[in-house]
Image (spheres, grey):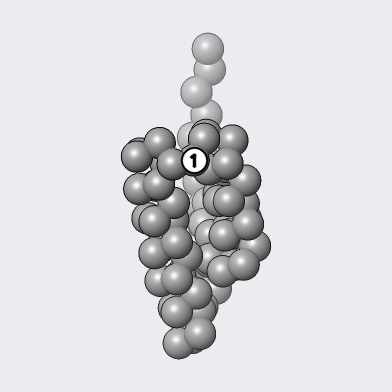
Amino acid sequence: MEVQRIENFKIPNAVAHEITQEELQKEYDYYRAQKVLETMFMFGMISVDEFHKISAVNRKTFSPFLSEIMP
């Protein structure tokens, strides 16, 4: 196996995004909704299927910052 050295390689800088108060509130609301949902699941109040369906609705409703990479 031949190993090659990569020189002068630079990782592009990510564009900084200043989070707004509204985005921060949506993140918080999503977090709280998911915590309630997790508690309901742990106490057997909802099934795994219901948990996943409601989680998907929460992602659409609250649009958390990283929703596009969430399962």
Lateral position of residue 25 relative to residue 39, left or right: right
Residue holding disc 1? 46
- Considering every residue shown, the one lying at the far bottom of the view is 21
Residue 69 in view, yes or no: no
> Splitting the image into 4 quarters, where does residue 50 fall?
top right
Image coordinates for residue 28, horizontal then vertical, percent: 40, 71
Task: Report the side of 64 relative to 38 (left or right).
Answer: right
Above or below, comparing residue 46 to residue 31 in the picture = above
Residue for point 59% across, 59% down: 59
When the figure is inspected, residue 5 is found, relative to residue 26, above or below; the finding is: above
Q: Please provide percent x and percent y for residue 70.
A: 55, 49
Pick the front one: 17 or 26: 26
Identify which residue is drawn at 45% across, 79% down: 25
Q: Residues within 10 Å of mark 1 (few under 14, many from 20)?
A: some
Q: Nearer the viewer, residue 37 or 14?
A: 37
Q: Residue furthest front?
A: 45
Viewer-proximal residue, 63 or 45?
A: 45
Towards the viewer: 8 or 38: 38
Residue 31, image x and y in percent? 41, 62
With respect to residue 35, does 71 lie above or below? above
In the displayed structure, 43 sits above or below 17; it is: above
The C terminus lies in which quarter of the figure? top right
Q: Look at 39% across and 64% down and name the residue there.
A: 32
For badge 1, the amino acid type reads: Ile
